Image (spheres, rainbow, N blue to C red):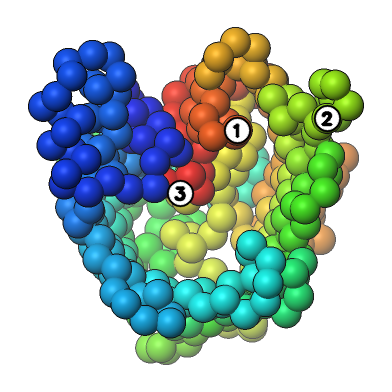
Amino acid sequence: MKIATLTLLCAALSSGADMADLKRDCTENHTFASFRNCLIDTFTVRPVHLIAANVVPGGGTAVGLRYTRAFEGSWHPEFTAAAASSLRAFWFTEAKLTLTHRVLDGPQDIFGMHIYSKTRNLPQLPYYGLGPGVSTGARADYQMNDQRVGVDASFPLTDWVNIGGIFENLWTSVDPITDPDIHSIETRYNDVTAPGLLRQPTMRHSEVFIRPHFSGMPPYWLDYKIAYGFYHDTGTGEFSFRRFSADVRHQLYLERTGGQVNRDSVIDLRGYFSTATAGAGHRVPFYLQETIGGSDITGSSALRGFIDYRFRGPHVVLFQAEFSRRIWGPLGLMAFYDAGTVALLRSDLDLKNLKHSFGFGLTGWAAGKVVFKAYIGLGSGEGRHPYFGIPAGLI
């Protein structure tokens, strides 16, 4: 965890170093400042530097290398390749070509495109069944390996709204756990209670989205993403389905110091809704259904008083509120409240029966934002859920 924290701080404090910076900071002036700069350079030097990241929640910290090379040209092409593994044998590899081109005059008015290939090996993931009524005693574990190859793009229509899309192929394999001390998924579930357990077809995923965003005038900041996607089973079509999602985020800076907005105090608000629909005779694979509880497989927090991946279903609703306040140097305090649920049928999404959690913790600040969190999630009735790590999306 210390390695992951240092990695985050390096990424927040520096955009990159070269070999001359690394040599100078690591061999000259043996002071605390030079040690700090040497550490930053180690995790940012180009073309090759160390990385530390979580592959998925519960997989431990993966340590590895990233190669970066930028090319000349009006599209600013940049190629990156990375690979990392944790002590628990969770690992990932990634290769990505990024192309960017300014379209309008604002700081975010840039057309961006990624061409990528990603692979993850996840030797132990928990499954509790589908729906909001599953118990922790129903847990079974499975192995999963997934790979995706595709392209995504985002185009600014104006300085406050982008449109974009994704087109990719997904290859997934789900396998049993061979350790006799672990309940493997096939011993408690079948292809009805865990759709897709027996067969994982190649999926073709296409998606379009619109993203209104506004960050130019404090104290209000917003970032919305409304997406509609189609997952096509390229074999029999049995597991083809559609998904609509709306992710709404606001930040409020309500404190002022000397008449200026105080960015050391922020309220984060989020609302999320997702619904997956399969036609007659079709099903949504369990491994592509979304989860809430702790953090999901992308690292996004949801119902933080519960353990990771606790509830799973094709339909999800979630509300979050979080207050963060810097109190001294890079240290701050936080408090949060979450409410949400999943459902097997869209008509069963009932806002009167949401599951709730709350918690308190510490934050680490750098470059004017929260870059590290350590908190305890409470209120689930299932014990305390601790978290130490990097907010999703920062690395």
Residue position marked by numbered label 3 in the rendering: 297
Residue at figure coordinates x 44%, y 59% from the top left: 287
Can residue 232 be seen in this snapshot?
Answer: yes
Q: Residue furthest top?
A: 328
Residue at figure coordinates x 48%, y 82% from the top left: 167
Which mark, by number, is residue 260? 2
Q: Nearer the viewer, mark 2 or mark 1?
A: 2
Asked if marks 1 and 3 touch (Cβ < 8 Å), the reply is no
Can residue 84 be seen in this snapshot?
Answer: no
Quadrant for residue 40, please give it. Answer: top left
Quadrant for residue 36, please give it. Answer: top left
Relative to 347, is 181 above or below? Answer: above
Residue position marked by numbered label 1 in the rendering: 368
Mark before the other along the chain sequence, 1 or 3 = 3
- Quick check: 64 left or right of 256? left
> In terms of secondary structure, where does tag 3 sit?
loop
- Quick check: 262 left or right of 281? right
Mark before the other along the chain sequence, 2 or 3 = 2
Q: CA distance from mark 2 to mark 3?
A: 39 Å
Residue at figure coordinates x 76%, y 41% from the top left: 251
Q: Nearer the viewer, mark 2 or mark 3?
A: 2
Q: Amino acid at mark 3?
A: Ile
Relative to 182, is 162 above or below? Answer: below
